[in-house]
Image (tube, grey):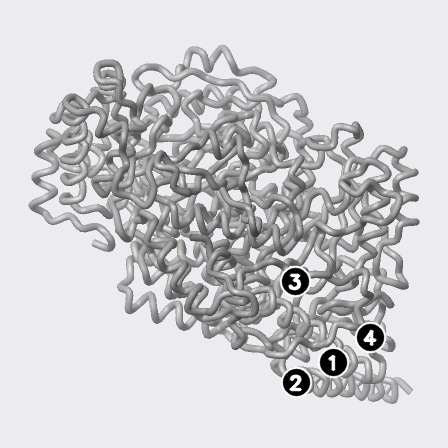
Amino acid sequence: MLIFEHSSKGRNGAPQSPVEKASVTDIPKNLLRKNSAALPEVSELQAVRHYTRLSRKNFSIDTEFYPLGSCTMKYNPRACNTLAMLPGFLNAHPLTPDQQNQGFLACMYDLQSMLCEATGMAAFSLAPMAGAQGEFAGVAMIGAYHNSRGDFDRKEMLIPDAAHGTNPATAVMCGFTVREIPTLDNGDVDIETLKQAVGPQTAGLMLTNPSTLGVFERNIEAIAKVIHEAGGLLYYDGANLNAILGKIRPGDMGFDVIHSNLHKTFSTPHGGGGPGSGAVGVAERLIPFLPLPTVAKEVTREEGLENESYHYLTAKDCPQSIGRLSAFMGNPGVLLRAFIYMRFLGREGMVRVAEFATLNANYMMAEAKRRGFTLAIDQRRASHEFIITLKNEARDFHVSAMDFAKRLLDLGYHAPTTYFPLLVPECLLIEPTESEAKEALDGFMDALEQIKHEAETNPELLHAAPQTLPVKRLDEVRAAKQLDLAFKPGASV
Amino acid sequence: MPFIPHTDQEITQMLAIIGADSIEDLFDEIPAHLRAAVMQAIPPGMTEMEISRLMQQRAEQNTKAVCFLGAGAYQHHIPAAVWEITTRGEFYSAYTPYQAEASQGTLQLTYEYQSMMTALTAMDVSNASMYDGASSLAEAILMAVRANRKSKSRKILLPTTVNPVYRQTAYTIVKGQQIELVEVPYDQTTGTVTLDQIKQQQDKQGGDITALVLQQPNFFGCLEAVDEITDWAHENNILLIAVINPLTMAVLKPPGEWGGNAHVDNNNNGADIACGDGQPLGAPMSAGGPYYGLLCCKQALVRQMPGRIVGRTKDLDGKEGFVLTLQAREQHIRRSKATSNICTNQGLVVTASTIHMAIMGAKGLENTAAACFANNNKLVAQLTAIDGMEKVFSATHFHETVLQFDDLAEDNCVADILAALMKKGIIGGYDLSLHYPELGHALLVCTTEMRSEEDINAYAKALQEVLCSLNSTQTAALSETA
């Protein structure tokens, strides 16, 4: 039932707004609204009950194991939320003079510095509001860098075929053409093809390492050399940074620009689809192009005492910047949560993230193999995620990866990522993260094994799944053909 | 170990299954000489008690001054229930609703958001949100360029009454695609953009214009002549992009109803695309975000819409349910041919905003918006009663107004006055000298329903004192010179 269907004419939550409507007769009539907006008219209790009930129709990290590959669904510490929502932060207007906003700016400056150290980059901007916007900023900086050198013909971006869809979409948005680079069966980039592909038209290469296939790109140094010798720049998609945090840094691998999904590696909540953060880091030569604003620290000495203060850098300070990406500075509430999480972990905690994420993934991969599943890439270490291919099950029992995914929901587990990466048929991309205990991993593997058995004996159970959730499988074709995108009073589905 | 549950015994068992001697062995594919050293620049870890203390201290450092700043972010009352429910783990820690059956909470809520936003804007379709108001304007422009097949120019008319940081953001995002953003100056008497100025710019550009952007209320808080301009745009095959403050639409004519004068085809009424920032509907100011960008359009443009969209459908038993739909527009399917690279929406903030709208209802939003308007009139009346303070523009203001300091000495500036006000616990407004130097010593003030009579009186009193002491300093300086 929709909130609109709880509505009764004339009911409202009066104590939440001024009780009397002030006069607006000074406003010319032709600029005024004629009829009230058709919003629901419900009591506060009705709204609270409706949305609390809706919340219970969601799977979430707080309620279920959520091994969604490439998404890093780790525990979002509650304290990060509580402390980011202290009144001093919530009530800060974004245009408050810097001097009155020092507590917040100090957190942002520290976050920039910690991200530099964690990734081996020279400088960071927190401006991008999501991974895709971080990519946009990174690729735009690559363009700005070449242009600043009068190198106007570098219009081609190289992207491995295993990449996230945002990579090619971003490159096109920034005015580049895309050239795909194939991946070898062992998961590494086909470096011979790469050598053939580079030239004076090459702007750069966008790479995720470990790749979306869940393995570390072993030839990264050779790849960096090929790109740099061709005059291109190397872009690091930080989607999988969780796998290597504290173990190896993108800056040390030769990357010139990176974005980090703070909602993955640094545990800010996914919130049912955002807000995220795609902070971007750069090597020395790209600093002038960073998106605005960034936060700088100034140390002054007064009567022998050191005084630290923080301020925003704007277009005046950074004339070569690619510019602004939002009205203010990214998603500050998300940035605060990432800052708090990093301070929780500290330097010793960073490396444990990668270690235990990797331990969990390799354990599950070994278990998967032991239980008779086919791995997409055998004989390699898993990074923080790995891939099962169900192509044999699909062939023999006519069950798909989607059927497995839906059946897992019935058994109380969120499904892994399905059908990504596109290179692997009928795949499940499984990422447990470091915050899950062994029991959860074992329980999930038991469920997967049970489903495999069901596929062999009773595939209908898989085709009909899920049975235990608020709805059964939904008609997506109908949704796209008979578009119903908003409630209209009187109309029914 | 923070947030890592493994016992020593479990680690041993797990390594045995893997067939590795140590966790370190799992990283043996990474070249040894590239391995990271200890991260000295990151401080050691903290307990929750320690980090709580640190954050309390830093939050305390931020000002508690009374805020008369707007300029794109507004302090409104948010019912306590809104964020209580929003931060329930089931909303807070869920992923994007790709597994629809396990995400009906988020999906239905988003459908309800889309319904509420189309009701408020009187537009046909809303998406599930963009990042913020500024980036949603950029996406609206890209969308208009894809949608307007009658225009070849890729030229967008962008009046300078549109929020300057929105214009900058739009430029950053669209400049890679050979789109030209052409500024249109405003009328210095009214504080709005006039049809004559728009026509002049159109002529200068050779006639063919893809879209025109119009902000209501505009950056100065003034109300634009939306009907006249929308009709003109449509007569000239120009798409009209509305930038709105959604709260004010509870009272003001919504973009879906703009235009519609006699000689124009009725089906063509209304803005073609509407965008703006959803912050006034349930998001705290929070130093700049997270907020969300609203993006709505006419039905005919829905396939050019970027971002996630939720649709209502049925399950195998014919029961109502919700899914992400029209995904063929998006990057994870279309890759380089997608409508945008956008992947995320601002789901959690949209959750808050939906609950906010449900609790407030149309009446609550109308009363809130009307109170903002009335309070601003009170503030402006009090401030302009002070010697040397004047209202600059003649157009009707909603809840923001540009004021000018008439007789400031050469070496004084708005920043000095704001600094002096800050010492008295007042954030006095937005200094317009950076983006609008032609306005001289000008200040954009804002009032919401949150500002009480006492707040307004306190501001007037503080400003009077500040100007007084400035004048006496000047007089003193003058007499010294003399």
Q: Is residue B455 visible?
A: yes
Name which residue lies at 77% across and 81% down: B383
Q: Eyeballing the image, is B101 above or below B252? A: above
Q: Are marks 4 and 2 in contact (CB under 8 Å)?
A: no
x and y percentages locating residue B267 in the rendered image: 76, 41
Look at label 3 and name its amino acid. Ser
Q: Residue at x 57, y 74 (%)?
A: A17
Q: Report whether residue A251 is seen.
A: no
- Looking at the picture, does residue A312 appear above or below residue B302? below
- Nearer the N terminus, badge 4 or badge 1? 1
Q: Are marks 1 and 2 in contact (CB under 8 Å)?
A: yes
Q: Chain of mark 2?
A: B
On the image, the x and y values in percent for residue B25 come to 18, 32
| Tag 4 and tag 1, C-beta contact below 8 Å | no
The residue under label 4 is B405
In front: mark 1 or mark 3? 3
Q: Percent position (x, y) of residue B125?
A: 61, 44
Q: Amino acid at mark 4?
A: Phe
Disc on res. B378:
1
**What secondary structure is found at the residue carrying circle 4?**
strand
Which class describes the residues within 10 Å of circle 1: few (<14), some (14-19), or many (20+)?
some
